[in-house]
Image (cartoon, helix red, strand yellow):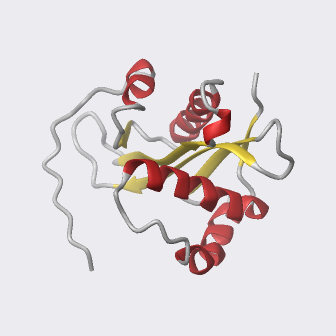
Amino acid sequence: MSVVRRALPADAEEVLRLRQVMIDAVFASDPSIAWHGESLPTLRAKLADSDGDFTAFVVDHPERAGALACLVAGTIDYRIGKAGDPQGMVGFVFSVATDPDARRRGYARACMNSLLEWFRERGARRVQLTASPEAEPLYVSLGFRPKPDPLLELAL
């Protein structure tokens, strides 16, 4: 089985590469990678902060030295508590991506399990994500359930 590990600052460029794989597959957006250079310093700092509210788990690519096969990233947000979740710690999963030539090997599931454990250790009682139709069966098999979401968004 694959060895899942926490992503390190040295993985930042590969993390961005796999994030772009996810963006290109899910969103009909600008395929430019010009933003990667501006994003790298912040990502490296976040990956170096092992006690922060962000983490990423990865699997090294078995056929390409220095490349990653899979990425799963997530954050924990504080929301004022409520019944059933008095601490208000909510996990959010994003940037789940597997290199196209490394799919169907269980890497995303293994990384998701590591991320879910990280959320549990930090007191998250709920975990949210947005799923593509192709990825939804994986998340449902892990216990995620569809939920009507009246999400509105404002770009600043």
| Nearer-the-camera pick, 100 or 79 | 100
Residue furthest out toward the top: 141
The residue lying at 27 percent from left, 80 percent from top is: 156
Q: Is residue 71 visible?
A: yes
Asked if 143 appears above or below 108 in the picture, the reply is: above
| Nearer-the-camera pick, 100 or 46 | 100
Residue furthest out toward the right: 65
Q: Position of residue 140 (x, y in %)?
A: 37, 22
Query: Does 9 sit left or right of 29 as displayed?
Result: right
Query: Does 32 sit left or right of 101 as displayed?
Result: left
Q: Is residue 51 visible?
A: no
| Nearer-the-camera pick, 139 or 19 | 19
Rendered image quadrant of residue 17: bottom right
> Which quarter of the rendered picture does the N terminus lie within?
top right
Q: Position of residue 8 (x, y in %)?
A: 75, 57
The residue lying at 33 percent from left, 33 percent from top is: 133
The residue lying at 36 percent from left, 63 percent from top is: 29
Q: Position of residue 149 (x, y in %)?
A: 17, 44
Q: Position of residue 120 (x, y in %)?
A: 52, 35
Number of numbered callouts drawn: 0
Asked if 52 appears above or below 148 in the picture, the reply is: below
Residue furthest out toward the left: 150
The residue lying at 64 percent from left, 73 percent from top is: 40
